Amino acid sequence: MSFLAKLKESQNISDIANLLGCSPKSLAYTIYKSQNNYITFKIRKKNGGHRDIKAPAKKLKELQRRLAKGLQECIEEINGKKNKRISSHGYTKGKSIFTNAYEHKNKNLVLNLDLENFFDSINFGRVRGYFIHNKNFMLPEKTATIIAQIACHENSLPQGSPCSPVISNMIAQILDVKLSALAKKNKCFYTRYVDDLTISTNRNIFPNDIMELHDHKPIIGKSLINEIKRSGFTINDNKTRVQCKDSRQDVTGLIVNKKVNVKSEFKHLARAMANNFFKNNQAFISLNGEKTPISLEKLNGMLSFIYQIRNRMDMQNANGQPRKTHDSFEKTYSDFLFYKNFAANNRTVVICEGETDNIYLNYAFKNLVSYYPELQNYGKGIKKRIDIHLFKQTKLLYRLLNITDGAGNNIKLLNTYQKRMSRFSSPRESFQLYCYLITTADQLGSKE
């Protein structure tokens, strides 16, 4: 029986507890009696100001995680039956900021709208009412109330809860249906990424339902405003933008003029910081006017993001095939991955020939720690770790570093190692290359 079917049959807190894999007593205490269910903190927004994050306590977070997983299964079951087009690209399986931006690629006009206080506007009553009245659920009132109690905090969906994204998508679906129909009627294209709405067209001007011009100033069309209001949301007028084809058009932070791409200033910043690491073993980023050191992991995330967006676009253009040769960005990213894994690595790096050798060596190292305590070192905080890095071979590392399973590829690494290390002005002085042959199989091929 599916999660949706079980949810429809649930009548009380015991049924919900069984569905979420906990005891009724534990569930009741968590949602009714516990006073310390959330920790509130602030994070900085890119455009200034702060966003309040309300992180659930461990027990509640696990309940919300299980509820979110079950509700996501419900969405997939419901959408699978209808086989309909999905307009929501945020927190949706198989969707991303790339798929959201791709829908608006190479259009004459792009309209960006922002929903004001998106999560805060979805209150306890809306969540409860949705599960009672939505035709796909039609849950008993008591069941819907318990779900809303698990999901909501201080009469809204908290940012930081694992189930806020999936529930917000469910409630905003009526908005997506209405705006998709309005866009289609006016020969436009519509998508939503969480609280970011985008409507684009190949027409020279937007139809009046979407946007009007008053004294050469763009005004959101009455039909569009009414549909958003009737769906229970409001527009943040300060973030409304209209972008023409002859200027830079961006959707959820990606450029969409001719193809989907990362902003050039972001790429230049990432490459400059990589080169600073190669020369000085450090790099800095400006945050609110302050010079702040950036970690290798953070920079790796930036470079990985650029690579993934470019790679997705390349594969769209070449029927699923990546580019055959490395361009200047990929060469920089390749150098960075080599620097990160070898030149800047403070641990002994072991590259195995076989696909499963890492598993056996990791098991062996853990069992040898009591005999050779020097194998163990402290990681972050007080947690101990094996002071050996077992190199994990991936498709990315094969493409950019040509490192993969097999002795032949390991020999290629040995032959090019010194040349690649010489590209860095300040490699770790104590790092030297040693070559060992480690056998983990007997003559019959069984592992020992």
Image (tube, rainbow, N blue to C red):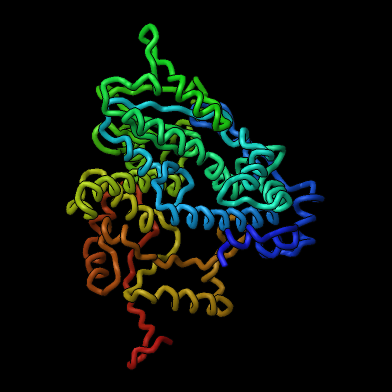
Q: Residue at x 39, y 46 (%)?
A: 85
Extreme residue in the bottom direction: 444
Extreme residue in the left direction: 324
Nearer to us in this view, 441 or 256: 256
Q: Residue at x 36, y 48 (%)?
A: 304
Residue 290 appears anywhere in the view = no
Q: What number of labels is visible?
A: 0
- Quadrant position of the C terminus in the picture: bottom left
Residue 286 appears anywhere in the view = yes
The x, y position of residue 207, in whole percent, is 34, 21
- Quadrant position of the N terminus in the picture: bottom right
Q: Is residue 270 left or right of residue 121?
A: left
137 lies above or below 378: above
Nearer to us in this view, 97 or 121: 121
Nearer to us in this view, 227 or 163: 227
Q: Is residue 258 left or right of residue 442?
A: left
Q: Residue at x 44, y 49 (%)?
A: 297
Extreme residue in the right direction: 33
Q: Residue at x 33, y 50 (%)?
A: 336
The x, y position of residue 195, in whole percent, is 50, 34
Q: Is residue 11 left or right of residue 112?
A: right
Where residue 414 sits, quadrant-wise, is: bottom left
The x, y position of residue 249, in whole percent, is 32, 28
The x, y position of residue 94, in whole percent, is 40, 52
